[in-house]
Amino acid sequence: MWKKIRIFVLLLVLGAVVQQTMIEQSDLDWSKNFYVAVYPINADGTAVVDSYISTLTKEDFEPIADYFSEEAKRFGLTMRRPFQVQLGAKVLRQPPAPPKAASAFEVIVWSLKFRYFAWKNSPQVAVKPKIRMYLLYFDPAANPGLSHSTALSKGRVGYVNLFGSKAYHRQNMVILAHEMLHTLGATDKYNLATTLPIFPEGFAEPNKAPRYPQDFAELMGGRVPISESKAEIPKSLLQTLVGEVTAKEIGWVK
């Protein structure tokens, strides 16, 4: 009995996901720009992070809008501003953390919980957003490393782990931009086990000769390839490019 109920629930979820996917794919014609709301969260509850969050302004996120504007031009997109980023109020609750080494069912359950969280915790911004990104800030002095961020194209929400310090702001913008493209269907282009970009789709300049070192990171490749066994984290968005495969995935190239 319970097995039949579980299967029925999964079929309902699958049907809703398919319907939502069809709706979301239809607006990748880029006839209108995407409004993005970013919501800061004090992930470790420290005064240091609270102080940092209080300094954030909308202008701090303008580099992302500028970056995507320039990258879109390279692919012939005529829209002046593909993304408009709005800074929302600080969210006091924390979203459910992504499961580790989970089954497909557990991932589906988590995604539904996260989307419900987003529905309940989306402070109003000037324009209703199509994309909602939850920025979980941590004190770098107490957290030398961060867990992987993640984002869902179903519901277009992101769970983004960042350092709550101005010293890391430019690198934070790289992570945020990467996760924003996940909400539009862009896929990771690096080896999950080694974090090395996958050739050729994970390389910003796959035809460069000699191949190494690369000068830029492909945004979804995540790192600048230095050699076959070494890659470096980009220091800012200025050290990244959107590759051809990624551009196709998000509808910039037909």
Image (cartoon, grey):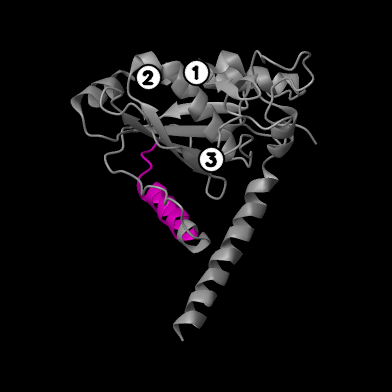
> Mark 1 vs mark 2: which is more N-terminal?
2
Residue 155 place in picture, x, y as percent: 52, 49
Marks 1 and 2, how far apart at CA = 10 Å
- Is residue 41 visible in this depiction of the protein? yes
Q: Nearer the viewer, residue 28 or 237?
A: 237
Specify whether 128 is left or right of 220: left
> Mark 2 vs mark 3: which is more N-terminal?
2
Q: Nearer the viewer, residue 83 or 46?
A: 46
Callout 2 secondary element: loop
Mark 1 sits on what residue?
62
Callout 1 secondary element: helix
> Mark 3 vs mark 1: which is more N-terminal?
1
Residue 163 place in picture, x, y as percent: 36, 25
What residue is at 72 percent from the left and 36 percent from the top?
Answer: 251
- Is residue 80 visible in this depiction of the protein? no
Residue 58 place in picture, x, y as percent: 42, 21
Q: Are there few (<14), some (14-19), or many (20+) residues within 10 Å of tag 3?
A: some
Specify whether 144 is left or right of 234: left
What residue is at 19 percent from the left and 25 percent from the top?
Answer: 47
Residue type marked 2: Thr
Residue type marked 3: Lys
Q: Are there few (<14), some (14-19), or many (20+) residues within 10 Å of tag 1?
A: some
Question: Magenta residues, as a range?
Answer: 108-124
Mark 2 sits on what residue?
57
